[in-house]
Image: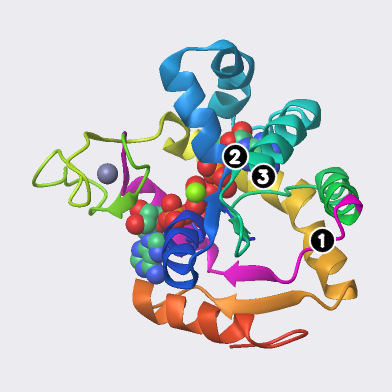
Amino acid sequence: MGPPGAGKGTQAEKVAGELNLAHVAPGDLFRQAVSRGDELGNEVKAYMERGELVPDAITIRVILGSLVNAHSGNGVVLDGFPRNINQARALDDALGKQNKAIDRAVYIKVDQKELVRRLSGRWLCSECQAPYFYDAKAEPKSNSCPNCGGKLYQRPDDKPETVEKRLQVYFDETSPLIDYYRKQNKLVEVCGEGGISEVKERIIKALGTTGVNNN
Ligand code: AP5
Ligand code: MG
Ligand code: ZN
């Protein structure tokens, strides 16, 4: 968990790789659907462009479906889900029916000025979805992904007006989940500032602990 730009996608990918977990992210699934132009893409496009949450009925259906298909023998890192109390309850119910549960909720904390700076310089790979940062005004030196060669692009919802809306949606709808997981004694808090590998090490360390942790 964490606000837009906190590094959820960046860290989820690295942590999943290191711990051999699947990585499931509604934002990535929705963006892929929009770029395919399929039925799901048409359903979610306008919400994403406005920086609003996609309706729960769609999101819950897509994510619970992809959890069934994920190669999740070792477990799954969820990135950007749940994002409100209703989604969290739906997830707990669905996992409970399979005698499973969320082990940890990692809350990545980053100062708001830094969030806005990161989002204005973010470029994404159109193939593997990996995010990269290049200074706000500077275009990346090469237009292709260092990871897989895919074409890099900027997200339409990273425009300043939409970032503001996404931050507001985060504070109104998603931040109450911090208490939801804190009460279940599953919350670990990690400082998301500093180098990407430094933050990754903090998360890996925090995952080994129970309860609130102020790394
Ligand atoms: P989503 O794609 O989840 O966007 P978000 O939550 O706004 O988060 P971001 O992806 O913007 O940030 P991030 O934390 O992943 O940061 P990143 O690692 O890229 O959702 C998009 C939309 O989809 C929503 O608005 C909604 O419409 C819909 N949606 C998604 N989930 C939904 C749900 N559950 N319910 C309903 N609707 C939903 O990093 C950001 C930048 O910073 C990158 O450039 C990166 O390279 C850089 N960076 C990362 N770490 C560091 C570091 N340590 N130091 C310096 N730079 C760094
Ligand atoms: Mg992301
Ligand atoms: Zn790539």
Residue at label 1?
100
Q: Was residue 102 drawn as part of the magenta stretch in this picture?
A: yes
Q: Which residue is mark 3?
A: 67
The residue lying toward the viewer, choosing from 100 and 115, is 100
Circles 3, 1 touching at the beta carbon (< 8 Å): no
- Residue at 43% x, 71% y is 18
Give coordinates of residue 54: x percent, y percent.
Answer: 69, 29
The residue type indicated by label 1 comes to Lys
Q: Secondary structure at mark 3?
A: helix
| Crowd around label 1: few <14 · some 14–19 · many ≥20 (10 Å) | few
Mark 2, residue position: 26
Amino acid type, callout 2: Pro
Query: Foreground mark, 2 or 1?
Result: 1
User: Which stretch did the figure color magenta?
Assistant: 97-126
Q: Is residue 93 left or right of residue 32?
A: right
Q: Secondary structure at mark 1?
A: loop
Q: Is mark 2 within 8 Å of ligand 1?
A: yes
Q: Quadrant of residue 210?
A: bottom right
Q: How many marks?
A: 3
Q: Was residue 101 drawn as part of the magenta stretch in this picture?
A: yes
